Amino acid sequence: MSEPFNSPVLRVEQPRRGPFAKSRYKVMDGDGTLLAVAAETGDHTRAERLQTLFPGKSDLHARAVLLTTPEGTPLMIVDKQTGRSLTEVRTPEDELVGTFRTERIGRHYLILGAKGNALGEVRVDLARNNFTVNDTAGEAVAHVRKKFAGVATHLLTTADKYAVQIADPVPEPLRTMAVMTAIVMDLSLHESKEIT
């Protein structure tokens, strides 16, 4: 990948939005320079939008976000399938980079390459706020932390912020998958909180 995301420190932020808005993210380097934006693709029916009003439901629905440069050049697609078991990361040309496959709901994810080969895993803490990305040898290659912004912000808004630290050098495609972990975990674990 990873020209725009070659920084070892990244921030992923999800701005506040209304209950019917699509998922959006900003990806910045450690200095706050905007590297990419992501927006949900596809339109939802009224029934699908209403389902997001009930916490705990929307993380079961399929969602896809397209990451682009700030100028609009496509970079990557994160495609969360229906349920909680599979999320694919694809290039704009629709080539599979890898998948996150749930082993234990919300606690352990396998990271697989395009051919189904093991690349590593994501381990999730009990609070679902810290995500450790390990390679196949069990060595930590990245850490993603969901920042706590206070009770009111957490309960009443969609504003989530993630800090991503990459322990370079990390070989591709594991590095790309490590960078995408914040968005994947947000779509899989935290998107049910959509009432603002």
Image (tube, rainbow, N blue to C red):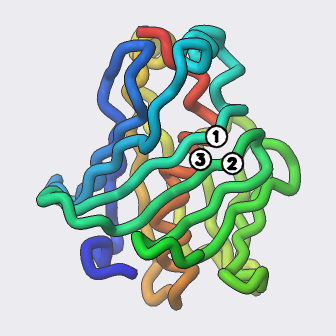
Tell me where residue 153 sits by quadrant. Answer: top left
Residue 86 drawn above or below residue 152:
below
Measuring from the top left, give residue 16's x and y in whole percent.
32, 23
Q: Quadrant of the N terminus?
A: bottom left
Going by the image, does 139 lie left or right of 69?
Answer: right
For mark 3, does the 10 Å Cα neighbourhood hold few (<14), some (14 to 19), or many (20 or more) residues?
A: many
* Numbered mark located on residue 185 in the image: 3
Residue 78 in sight? yes
Instruction: Name the residue carrying label 1.
Output: 62
Q: Label 2 sits on what residue type?
A: Gln
Going by the image, does 2 lie left or right of 192?
Answer: left
Instruction: Name the residue carrying label 2.
Output: 81
Measuring from the top left, give residue 185's x and y in whole percent.
59, 47
**Residue drawn at the location 57% of the way across and 10% of the way down:** 50
Q: Label 3 sits on what residue type?
A: Met
Circles 1 and 2 in contact, beta carbons < 8 Å:
yes
Residue 44 drawn above or below residue 76:
above
Circles 3 and 2 in contact, beta carbons < 8 Å:
no
